[in-house]
């Protein structure tokens, strides 16, 4: 590995420099922002997990009274909201931030300061929602927050307001992430990196960002409408004055169904990187994989009513949406078979990352099959609102998304943090999580078929529900043990000296072609891409990646604190609206718009870095 | 390919990026993508309005309260502002900074006129018995047109900021992109109004 020394020189003016924690807060570097996304997601995961454990303890035996029914409602609501919005999406966006610019040979994202704003809106918006526990109670109307239950009449407390405003704040951030990465992927690919030469993870990021772009505005509108109802006594969902409760359901699921693909498509992308790497084979059916992602995204906007089969919308509507829902199984099945065909005849290495990736396939298939069962509208009336649904979506969200996220953590850890996680602890971590997951969630299929409804805070004896519930609770503690092993693995790895291995897995895509730790400018010279899996091909031919530009000064964007303060101002406006301190909300909103205005006329001259690479180049 | 020398490779790379037709500035693709998201935003608001506009409860209906001549004048003012912003951008492309500033001032002024019409309309509706709290129709009407009005107001704010910047520091390549991006936003806000005028006011008066 070539040593790189840097001289930072003045471009137009000295870039402001920050120290310690401020260096992180002001960072506009996609790698640091990615790391902060992942840290914050793991932080919120601890809370979401604790809420789930309390739910499982409460359901240990009939007529249990560990927590009250009110607290129970808050626990499962916040568990769902946390895991979807504050864990699954941010951890995937974290990987996308840390990895996608490297995979396409870019030096940063298209809008670095906006990227920082996205991060801080997510972090501060998430913390905002969590302060609800100390301010009169957390949201308690379920993660999809149906009216009229979530209306002012049945939910007079501030909990639902925290949901409405908190999700708007994090949602704006997510929307800006979508704009940022769409432009980054479309505009900033290295020369020669045509769309059909992009790594599959980047493909999944591209399609996910399109989903976010069109799915988040409907939920934003929905949250605005409910906020108008709750704070200003409008009548969108007030039936006596002409409102309509189904409006909430429609807008929510027009967002909500694409949302489940927003959290699964990047997971597909991670699996599509790991399985070829650890099979030492190219991804089977590359074009069909990219096409399948696109078809899934397209169909995902046409299935939302399958969440509303029990509404009584009539057989025609239900049939149409049942068919479109089942259609999604076709492109998904193509992906499953392509992964299996990639493994076929490969030299498979059972690293922890690959164990997680391999376990993803059967677990996701189980979730997919129960999904097709739920898509059958007449049968759905039997499963609806039972634990069968809970089992289904945990198999796709935990067995799918989280297993892939953990696979990605072990896989990209050396790239992101310059160290390898312990494989020995990794085995313990994987097997405890795998066993714990199945022990927790498989019995829920049976509970559902035996008629146990979702969201009940306790149950009477004599239904045969006690034993499966107790098995599930034991499983939850095995899961806890598995996650504690992961925590120990993370801490002990951070205490070790970095090993700084550039390419520990014999990787295929460009993120492994640069030295470790990744230089702040990523690529001293942007590579010229002549193949799919260009880096792997170059290694096999014993060559270096060709370069697309001569060595020269590299322009970097300046760090900035303004995104953080803008996000903070928006959160203050949120508190003002929520606590009915109108002057505070108004002043903070005006201050936010003023800061946005300053961003609109802002001119960042940045600074230049001169990479000083000795003969031999950066990549070896 | 290994046969290429370093300089040929760079030439090829340059050609490839030309083939891809990459635009020079990310902000232009960025604003188009943002406006695509805005389409989904207004589609959701307009869809909600269309679903609720018959829910008038005891309040007035759209047919009773809409004042078409007034709204038509407001519409013409807003559509004219799309013309003036085009003339402003055209002047900018001719490097006529004074012309650009003149047309942008006019655009901001027309935007303010539109907002004044909207303010007047809200005031008369309020005294005609239609408020946010009257009925679902009232809620949907004020929220939809109110959010459009906020978009116009933000556009005016944006234009004024760019005007002050160009008056204080002149214009350069970076600032021309800023103006162009703003003009795309301004057109979008006008186009959305055409849809609102048709579906809310015209259809409301007939139905």
Image (spheres, helix red, strand yellow):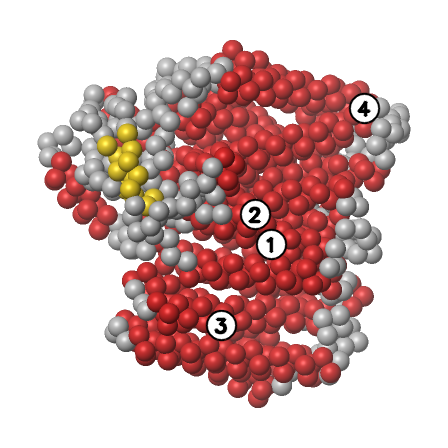
Chain for numbered disc 3: B
- On screen, A355 above or below A71? above
What residue is pinned by disc 1? A570
Q: How many marks?
A: 4
Chain for numbered disc 1: A
Sequence order check, earlier mark of 2 and 4: 4
Marks 3, 1 in one chain: no
Secondary structure beneath label 1: helix
Secondary structure beneath label 4: loop
**Residue drawn at 32 percent across, 79 percent down:** B99
Q: Is residue A484 left or right of residue A195?
A: right
What residue is pinned by disc 3? B156
What residue is pinned by disc 2? A121
- Give the spatial CA distance, label 2 vs label 1: 8 Å
- Give the spatial CA distance, label 3 vs label 1: 21 Å
Image quadrant of residue A486?
A: top right
CB atoms of marks 2 and 3 within 8 Å: no
Label 2 Cα crowd, 10 Å radius (few <14 / some 14-19 / many 20+): many
CB atoms of marks 3 and 1 within 8 Å: no
Residue A114 image position (x, y, % from top left) = 46, 50
What residue is pinned by disc 4? A60
Residue B202 image position (x, y, % from top left) = 58, 80
- Give the spatial CA distance, label 2 vs label 4: 37 Å
Secondary structure beneath label 3: helix
Marks 2, 4 in one chain: yes
CB atoms of marks 2 and 1 within 8 Å: yes
Marks 2, 1 in one chain: yes
Chain for numbered disc 4: A
């Amino acid at each position: 590995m070539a040593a790189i020394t840097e001289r930072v020189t003045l471009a137009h003016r000295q870039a402001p420099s920050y120290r310690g924690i401020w260096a992180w807060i002001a960072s506009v570097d996609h790698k640091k922002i990615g790391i902060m996304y992942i840290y914050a997601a793991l932080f919120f995961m601890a809370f979401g997990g604790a809420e789930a454990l309390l739910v499982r303890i409460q359901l240990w035996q009939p007529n249990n009274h560990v927590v009250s029914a009110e607290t129970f409602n808050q626990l499962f609501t916040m568990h769902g909201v946390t895991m979807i919005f504050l864990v699954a999406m941010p951890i995937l966006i974290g990987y996308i931030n840390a990895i996608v610019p490297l995979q396409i040979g870019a030096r940063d994202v298209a809008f670095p300061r906006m990227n920082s704003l996205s991060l801080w809106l997510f972090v501060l918006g998430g913390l905002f929602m969590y302060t609800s526990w100390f301010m009169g109670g957390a949201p308690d109307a379920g993660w999809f927050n149906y009216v009229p239950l979530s209306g002012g009449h049945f939910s007079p407390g501030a909990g639902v307001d925290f949901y409405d405003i908190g999700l708007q704040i994090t949602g704006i951030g997510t929307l800006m992430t979508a704009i940022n990465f769409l432009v980054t992927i479309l505009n900033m690919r290295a020369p020669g990196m045509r769309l059909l030469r992009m790594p599959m993870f980047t493909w999944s990021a591209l399609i996910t960002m399109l989903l976010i772009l069109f799915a988040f505005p409907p939920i934003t509108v929905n949250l605005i409408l409910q906020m108008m109802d709750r704070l200003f006594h409008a009548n969108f969902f007030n039936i006596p004055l002409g409102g309509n409760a189904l409006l909430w359901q429609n807008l929510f699921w027009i967002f909500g169904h694409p949302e489940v693909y927003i959290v699964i498509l990047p997971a597909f992308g991670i699996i599509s990187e790991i399985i070829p790497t650890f099979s030492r084979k190219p991804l089977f059916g590359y074009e069909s994989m990219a096409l399948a992602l696109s078809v899934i995204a397209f169909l995902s906007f046409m299935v939302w009513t399958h969440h509303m089969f029990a509404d009584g919308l009539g057989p025609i509507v239900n049939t149409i949406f049942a068919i479109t829902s089942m259609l999604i199984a076709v492109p998904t099945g193509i992906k499953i078979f392509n992964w299996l065909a990639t493994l076929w005849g490969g030299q498979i290495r059972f690293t922890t990352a690959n164990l997680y990736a391999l376990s993803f396939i059967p677990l996701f298939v189980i979730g997919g099959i129960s999904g097709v069962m739920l898509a059958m509208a007449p049968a759905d009336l039997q499963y609806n609102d039972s634990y069968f649904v809970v089992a289904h979506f945990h198999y796709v969200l935990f067995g799918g998304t989280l297993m892939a996220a953990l696979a990605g953590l072990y896989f990209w850890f050396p790239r992101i943090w310059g160290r390898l996680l312990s494989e020995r602890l990794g085995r313990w971590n994987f097997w405890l999580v795998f066993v714990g997951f199945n022990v927790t969630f498989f019995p829920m299929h049976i509970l559902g078929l035996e008629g146990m409804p979702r969201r009940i805070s306790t149950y009477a004896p004599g239904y045969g529900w006690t034993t499966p519930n107790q098995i599930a609770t034991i499983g939850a503690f095995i899961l806890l043990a598995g996650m504690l092993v992961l925590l120990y693995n993370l801490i002990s790895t951070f205490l070790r000296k970095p090993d700084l291995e550039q390419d520990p897995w014999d990787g295929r895509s460009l993120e492994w072609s640069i030295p470790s730790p990744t230089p702040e400018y990523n690529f001293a010279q942007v590579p010229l891409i002549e193949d799919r899996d260009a880096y792997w091909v170059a290694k096999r031919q014993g060559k270096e990646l060709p370069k697309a530009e001569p060595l020269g000064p590299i322009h970097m964007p300046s760090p900035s604190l303004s995104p953080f303060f803008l996000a903070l101002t928006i959160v203050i406006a949120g508190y003002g609206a929520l606590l009915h301190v109108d002057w505070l909300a108004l002043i903070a909103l005006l201050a936010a718009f003023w800061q946005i205005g300053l961003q609109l006329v802002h001119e960042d001259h940045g600074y230049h870095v001169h990479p000083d690479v000795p003969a031999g180049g950066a990549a070896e | 390919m290994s046969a290429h020398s370093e300089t040929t490779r760079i030439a090829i790379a340059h050609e490839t990026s030309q083939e891809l037709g990459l635009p020079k500035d990310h902000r232009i693709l960025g604003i188009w993508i943002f406006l695509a998201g805005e389409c989904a935003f207004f589609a959701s608001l307009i869809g909600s309005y269309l679903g609720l506009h018959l829910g008038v409860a005891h309040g007035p209906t759209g047919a009773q309260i809409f004042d078409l001549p007034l709204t038509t004048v407001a519409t013409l003012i807003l559509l004219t502002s799309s013309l003036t912003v085009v003339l402003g951008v055209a002047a900018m492309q001719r490097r006529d900074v004074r012309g650009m500033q003149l047309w942008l001032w006019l655009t901001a002024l027309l935007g303010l006129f539109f907002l004044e019409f909207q303010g007047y309309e809200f005031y008369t509706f309020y005294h005609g018995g239609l408020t946010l709290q009257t009925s679902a129709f009232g809620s949907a009407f004020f929220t939809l047109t109110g959010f459009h009005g906020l978009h116009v107001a933000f556009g005016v704010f944006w234009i004024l900021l760019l005007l002050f910047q160009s008056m204080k520091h002149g214009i350069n390549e970076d600032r021309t992109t800023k103006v162009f991006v703003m003009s795309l936003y301004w057109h979008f806000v006008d186009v959305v109004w055409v849809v609102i005028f048709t579906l809310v006011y015209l259809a409301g008066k007939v139905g």
